[in-house]
Structure formats: structure tokens, C-alpha cells
Image (cartoon, rainbow, N blue to C red):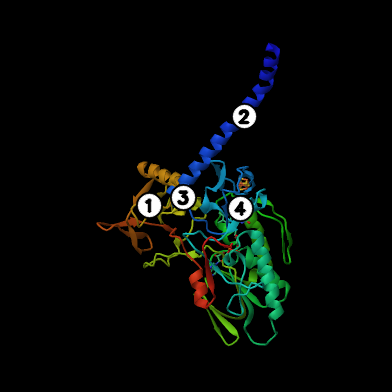
Amino acid sequence: MPSVFLNVLVFSMPLAVLASIYLMLQKRHHAKALDRLQEAQASGLTEPATLHPVIDPSVCIGCGTCVSACPEGRILGLINRKAVLVSPASCIGHGACNDACPTGAISLVFGTETRGVEIPQLDSDFETTVPGVFIAGELGGMGLIKNAIAQGKQAVDAISWRLRKTSGSALDLVIVGAGPAGLSAALAARQKGLQFAVLEQDSVGGTVSHYPRGKVVMTQPAELPLVGKFQFREASKETLMEFWESVADNVRSEIHTGCRVERIEKSADLFTITTPQETFHSRFVLLAMGRRGTPRKLGVTGEDLPKVVYRLIDPEQYSNRHVLVVGGGDSALEAALAVAGQPGTTTSLSYRSGAFSRAKTKNRSAVETAVAAGKINLFMNSNVTRIEASEVIIDSGDRQDTLPNDDIIVCAGGVLATGFLRSIGIHVEEKFGTV
Ligand SMILES: Cc1cc2nc3c(=O)[nH]c(=O)nc-3n(C[C@H](O)[C@H](O)[C@H](O)COP(=O)(O)OP(=O)(O)OC[C@H]3O[C@@H](n4cnc5c(N)ncnc54)[C@H](O)[C@@H]3O)c2cc1C
Ligand code: SF4
């Protein structure tokens, strides 16, 4: 009898050890996921910007396959053995979780019950409700580089089918935006022999150029006109940007950078596309503007000085300079911290509210530490009222400060493209947690 008991003990011990390791890991995953969810809630980062998963808890078996399948990592987590979107604002709509779920517990949707996402109405050729105006890439609702590449090409295929050769000085096509969708469309337009122009408010590369330094970009192979296979599965942001620059060389003379499209009007069969620099006339328009919108401006005197920029590119360029960062979101806080880390720099941060309620806890506490250490001069409840060549004036209600200034980085968010789409007459639908 004692030997039977011993045998049971010998066999059950490893099982008990394995079970307790499993339970410990489960507990740790639960705690980490809960932390991330609470952090997102505390920072108000609870709304996904694009297509994202909704999990049906009654179907979810808590296997965690979706958590490991997400290429962005740490977006989903297991809480009480159910999958939860714990970092909603960081979800970019890969949809890999949906493909991986063995029980079909996930559906991919736009918007949430509380916040609608506006999606333009498109037909199967990517034409909008305004005949002659097409949309490709993320602006149409579908994120991801491979979709943008495919749609840019397909839209130009459809446009070239409809194009009747006519004489005159108007272009066949104006493409707005030089991100993956716009560049793919430009290559297709070159391949088809169209007369075209690409108008880009910023520089070549689109949203990819705004990724954090060193970000690993995950994508699937796609086919680029003229260039051939887009082979990257995993690449750093910098490698991808080098690639886009080399791709752009095929259509460089047609790309107008720093050229923001402000208005599009149609009369007879032609569109007039207005930018601050030039006016273009074209038979077709392809909007490949993404969903980041255009940077929100301060609207103050002096904002047109070249020292005012709307994003941080290289912190090192600010060493030994007087820099003002304006804004209170993560990008403003991260810019201020990066600039403050440069040698010999004086960094000021101005925000119009009294608290950084929309930034991650990590960034808020890093800024608090930098302020306490005298590395950042903080102006809360303040507004920039005037910008001059070597100074900036900040109004904090009870006092005005004139700061020596060489550079201003404005991170005040973006103006969404949907108002612009409506101004052209394009029908836009608001989705509240639907496809
Ligand atoms: C942090 C982050 C990480 C991501 N990681 C990945 C990833 O790993 N893999 C992946 O596949 N996708 C990823 N994505 C999504 C991917 O970047 C986008 O889906 C893709 O860039 C969309 O391409 P697009 O050409 O439609 O738009 P965009 O890349 O946004 O390009 C639009 C261009 O239009 C320009 N524009 C806008 N308005 C105007 C105007 N009025 N006049 C002139 N120009 C204008 C903009 O300046 C911009 O250059 C990520 C997104 C983010 C934010
Ligand atoms: S893969 Fe499906 S079943 Fe498994 S945890 Fe994720 S949602 Fe739940």
C-alpha cells in the first residue's frame, strides 16, 4: 500500500508543479493586462482609431492565441481568462487576431458605441459619390501598408479605363498624398502613361515617416507597379523610409512636397485643385490622404516663420538652442523630453489646459521629473500669442512671458480629413462599432 501511495505521489508531483506554474503565469498575464488597460483608461486612450477587434466573451475560451498573433504586441491581453483590447488606441487594424482565433470570438469593426468613425462611401472601383474623385488607402477605412499599395494601383487601373484622351493642358490625374497608397498610385499612373501630379503637404512616405524611431514594421508582400514585389515582412521604419525614397525616384519630377491641398472644386469635366503655391487642373482626382489629417495650427502671428514645425524629426538638431514645444498629448510630451535631453538646450513646454489628461502616465511622470530637475520650463494654462524671429510670447492669463526662441515644435493634433471630404460633396458614413 505505501508503495502505491508513493507511486501516485511521484506521478502527481510534476503535474502539481506544472499546474502551479501555469496558474502563476496566468495570474501574471492577468495583472499585466489589467495594468495596461487601466493605464489606457487613465490616459483617455480608449478609442481605437481604425478597424479593430471586438471580442465576444461568451465565445472566447481564453486560449490567448489572439494575444500572441497580434504583430504589434501588447494590444490584446487576457483578463479573467477572456481576451480584452487593453491598448485600444495603439491598435492599427492588422486583423491577425481575427484570423488566429479558433472559436470565431472576434469581429473587426470601425468605431465604438460611444465614438463614431467616419468612413467615405466608395464603390468597388474606389470611386466616391462624386464622380471622378477616388479614394485609396487608409482614408477609405482600411489601414495597413499592403492594402494602401493594392488600392492605390487598383484605383488608377479604374481611372485609366475611364480616361478618354483629350487635348488641353489639364492633367489626367492629381494624386493627393505621397504615402504608400499615393506612391503606388503614382507608379501605376507612370506605367499607364498618364499625365499626373502628386501633391504632398509634408514629405514622401506618409504615416510611416511618423513612426517612432526604430519601430519594427510588419507587413505582407505586395506588388508595386514598375518596381515589382514589395518583399518586406519585417523592417525597421528607417529601412522602409529608404525604400520609399528610392521608389519615389521613379516619379520624382511629378511629386510636389510641402504642397497642401486646401480646396477641390469641379466645373464641367475638370477639377480645380488649390494649394497655397499653385492651382492644378485635372480630369480625375485620387485622394490618398490617410487618416492622420493635417496638423492643427496655432493661428498666431509669426506661425509662418520657418522655425515653426509640426513634428519632431531629429532631436539632435536642437542641441544648444532655445526650443518651445506646444501641446499636451503624448507626442508633445515625448518631443519635449527628447529635446530636453540634448546638450545645451533650453526647453519650454506650453499647454492650454491645466493637466496632461490625454497623455500616458509614463510620459506625464517623466515630464514631472524633468520639470523638477529644471530641464523643462512648464507653462500650463497658457497660449502662444505671438512668434517673432528670435522670441516667442506666451500668455498664461495672469502674466505674459517673452522667451528667447530659436525653434517651435507644435504638437496640437490634427484636423481630420472628413470635413474636407464633405466640402467636395463626398458622402461620409459614421460607423459606431460596425463594419
Ligand atoms: C504607429 C503606427 C504604426 C503602424 N505600423 C504598421 C505596420 O507595422 N504595418 C502596416 O502595414 N501598417 C502600419 N501602420 C498603418 C500604416 O502606416 C497606414 O495604414 C499606411 O501608412 C496608410 O497609407 P496611406 O498612403 O493610405 O496614408 P498615409 O501613409 O497616412 O499617407 C497620407 C499622406 O497624405 C498626405 N496628406 C494628407 N492630407 C493632405 C493634403 N490636404 N494635401 C496634401 N497631402 C496631404 C499626408 O501628409 C501623408 O503623407 C501603422 C500606423 C501607425 C500610426
Ligand atoms: S483567440 Fe479567440 S478564443 Fe482565444 S483568447 Fe483570443 S478571442 Fe478568446
Tell me the element at label 4.
strand
Q: CA distance from mark 1 to mark 4?
A: 45 Å
Where residue 302 appears, as percent x and y from the top left, is 38, 66
Amino acid type, label 3: Glu
Number of numbered discs: 4
Which of the two marks, 3 or 1, is nearer to us in this view?
3
Check if mark 3's residue and mark 1's residue have beta carbons within 8 Å.
no
Reading the image, the residue beneath label 3 is 334
Does any atom of ligand 1 lie closer than 8 Å to the CB of label 3?
no
Counting residues from the N terminus, which is met first, the one under dot 4 or under dot 3?
4
Label number found at residue 19: 2
Q: What residue do we see at 70% from left, 12% from top?
A: 3
Where residue 1 appears, as percent x and y from the top left, is 69, 12
Counting residues from the N terminus, which is met first, the one under dot 1 or under dot 4?
4
Check if mark 3's residue and mark 2's residue have beta carbons within 8 Å.
no
Label number found at residue 106: 4
Where residue 290 appears, as percent x and y from the top left, is 56, 65
Counting residues from the N terminus, which is met first, the one under dot 3 or under dot 1?
3
Tell me the element at label 2.
helix
Label number found at residue 348: 1
Q: CA distance from mark 4 to mark 2?
A: 28 Å
